[in-house]
């Protein structure tokens, strides 16, 4: 299979509360380093002709404005938690100018989360100005959006099934603390892996920093970026300086190509 050249933009790299966290006065939340300011986690995948957003966060509007995005082809939803679906209503401006609905892809649970987030969009009585979306339920079978092939990867967020996605040699996984052996096989061969690393201390539903490092080494991924970071992980520069070669903390606005 031929894969297009891709540009990946990190729209947000923070956990569900974002960083700084409201009301917190820790050294991370009061840091003057812009890399310690993290919106909710999301990425944008772009080929020459296709733009895909992974997760519509509560910061979606600002993320689109910051990157000066005029058109998107689809949104992939990893799972139904608020910090990954709350921005769906903010897709309306794209619809105003394109006169087309927003195409949203995810498993059944993710799409149900979208329905619950914007129930007024699915009422039989259509209020003027409501978001117009097409929901596409996807399984673990590969599919294509525009010219970008997508391979879903099942990961576990405690007991919740979450989808990671592989795009050619690039794999993106957020909100996970366990990946079954069969699904790990889908990641092997990736040149770049993005993985959640919430904090250093154990967590019931997220990889710790050390667990994320160990998984990168196990899968023999040459380059990795950690995301979905909380203020508990520590200052960006301090943590980044201690990471093994080939592994970095992602930050908002980071752009990579593959």
Image (cartoon, grey):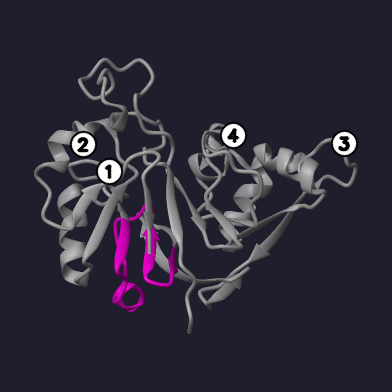
Q: Which residue is mark 3?
A: 127
Residue at (64, 43) in percent of width and height:
88
How far apart are the two marked residues, 4 and 1, measured between alpha carbons?
24 Å
Q: Secondary structure at mark 4?
A: helix
How far apart are the two marked residues, 3 and 4, measured between alpha carbons?
21 Å
Q: Which mark is residue 61?
A: 4
How far apart are the two marked residues, 3 and 2, measured between alpha carbons?
44 Å
Q: Secondary structure at mark 1?
A: loop
Q: Nearer the viewer, mark 4 or mark 1?
A: 4
Q: Secondary structure at mark 3?
A: loop
User: Is label 3 in contact with label 1 (beta carbons under 8 Å)?
Assistant: no
Q: Nearer the viewer, mark 2 or mark 4?
A: 4
Q: Is residue 1 left or right of 228 when viewed as pictured?
A: right
User: Is label 4 in contact with label 1 (beta carbons under 8 Å)?
Assistant: no
How far apart are the two marked residues, 3 and 1, measured between alpha carbons?
40 Å
Residue at (83, 45) in percent of width and height:
123
Q: Where's residue 161, x and y in %?
A: 45, 61
Q: Secondary structure at mark 2?
A: helix
Q: Nearer the viewer, mark 3 or mark 4?
A: 4
Q: Earlier in the sequence, mark 4 or mark 1?
A: 4
Q: Earlier in the sequence, mark 3 or mark 2?
A: 3
Q: Which mark is residue 233?
A: 2
| The furthest residue to the bottom | 1
Residue at (55, 31) in percent of width and height:
62
Q: Nearer the viewer, residue 154 or 6?
A: 6
Q: Which residue is mark 1?
A: 198
Residue density around tag 4, few if under 14, some if 14–19, many if 20 or more, within 10 Å: some
Q: Earlier in the sequence, mark 3 or mark 1?
A: 3
User: Is label 3 in contact with label 4 (beta carbons under 8 Å)?
Assistant: no
* Magenta-highlighted residues: 165-194
Q: Earlier in the sequence, mark 1 or mark 2?
A: 1
Q: Nearer the viewer, residue 196 or 220?
A: 220
């Amino acid at each position: 299979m031929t894969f297009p050249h891709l540009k990946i933009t990190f729209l947000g790299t923070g956990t569900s509360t974002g960083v700084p966290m409201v009301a917190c006065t820790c050294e991370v939340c009061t840091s003057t380093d812009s890399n310690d300011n993290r919106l909710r986690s999301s990425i944008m995948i772009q080929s020459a002709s296709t733009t895909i957003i992974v997760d519509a966060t509560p910061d979606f509007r600002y993320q689109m404005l910051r990157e000066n995005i005029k058109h998107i082809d689809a949104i992939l939803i990893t799972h139904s938690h608020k910090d990954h679906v709350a921005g769906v209503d903010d897709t309306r401006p794209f619809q105003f100018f394109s006169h087309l609905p927003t195409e949203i892809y995810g498993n059944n649970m993710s799409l149900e989360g979208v329905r619950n987030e914007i129930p007024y969009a699915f009422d039989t009585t259509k209020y003027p100005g409501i978001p117009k979306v097409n929901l596409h339920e996807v399984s673990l079978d590969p599919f294509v959006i525009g010219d970008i092939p997508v391979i879903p990867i099942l990961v576990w967020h405690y007991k919740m099934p979450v989808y990671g996605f592989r795009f050619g040699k690039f794999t993106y996984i957020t909100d996970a603390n366990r990946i079954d052996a069969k699904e790990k096989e889908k990641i092997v061969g990736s040149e770049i892996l993005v993985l959640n690393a919430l904090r250093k201390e154990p967590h019931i539903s997220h990889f710790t920093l050390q667990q994320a490092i160990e998984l990168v080494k196990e899968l023999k991924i040459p380059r990795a970026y950690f995301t979905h970071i909380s203020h508990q992980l520590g200052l960006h520069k301090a943590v980044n300086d201690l990471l093994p070669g080939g592994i970095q903390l992602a930050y908002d606005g980071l752009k990579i190509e593959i």
